[in-house]
Image (cartoon, rainbow, N blue to C red):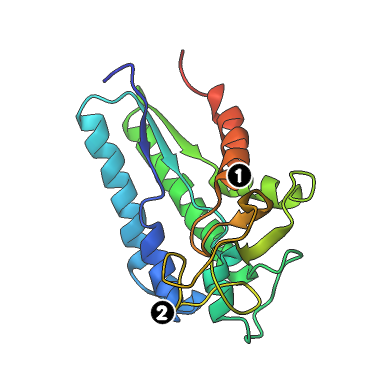
Amino acid sequence: LKSSLFSIEAMGANDYLIAMLRGKTIEELKKMDLVSQVIKANEEGVRKIIGYGATQVLVTGYLHVGCAPSLLAMRSNSSDARDQFGCLKDYNDFIKYHNDLLREAISRLRKEHPDVLILIGDYYTAMQSVLDNHQKLGFESVLVACCGTGGKYNFDHRKKCGTQGVQSCSDPRKYISWDGLHMTQESHKHIAKWYIQDIFSKFRS
């Protein structure tokens, strides 16, 4: 256990996404107890792993939910502010808000356990690197799902990828989003490359 790396991967991400897909506004999300519950769950998860004997723990932040075709399709007729890629700014700002609170929690945990290496994985910046360089990386579409049907974002909540009659694009390597909720293997590859380079030097040998 002392020579292993333990990773807590985006705990609570689906809780946020489901609330968003059910129409909760950013202000409603912040007023709910959900954020504090998610942060607390991450802290408790780290403490539990350390209790088992872990000495190296990686806790991952979240990436740009405001660029997800599933959410964009639901709010395609709204007046929400968009960034240069067409992503929903308020929703991405909410993710930054969560990530900031997660960093504060990690700081508290480091003080509690000075002999344990506790790191935060910066998925947000990794994804931002892919967005900023998407053309150079060969992505033709930032916001359109490869596997889906209908509308500006090729996503229909009633006909998701995997259901009868829904087809995938001919070349998933040119798309960042696979099915409107998850990313393609190609986008994961580039995110992982940035991510690993960022955290590798921070681990103990």
Residue 35 appears in the rendering: no
Alpha-carbon span between mark 2 and mark 1: 29 Å
Q: Nearer the viewer, residue 75 or 144?
A: 144
Q: Position of residue 199 (x, y in %)?
A: 54, 29
In this view, the residue farthest toward the front is 165
User: Tag 1: Cα neighbours inside 10 Å, few (<14), some, or many (≥20)?
Assistant: some
Question: Where is residue 93, by image quadrant?
Answer: bottom right
Q: Amino acid at mark 1?
A: Glu
Task: Identify the disc placed on residue 22.
Answer: 2
Circle 1 SS class: helix
Circle 2 SS class: loop
Q: Position of residue 59 (x, y in %)?
A: 41, 40
Q: Relative to 27, is 130 on the left or the right? A: right
Q: Is residue 88 above or below residue 47?
A: below
Q: Residue at x 56, y 61 (%)?
A: 168
Q: Residue at x 72, y 52 (%)?
A: 139
Q: Quadrant of the N terminus?
A: top left
- Residue labelled with disc 1: 186
Q: Position of residue 35 (x, y in %)?
A: 38, 63
Q: Is residue 175 above or below residue 66?
A: above
Q: Amino acid at mark 2?
A: Arg
In this view, the residue farthest toward the top is 205
Question: Where is residue 73, by image quadrant?
Answer: bottom right
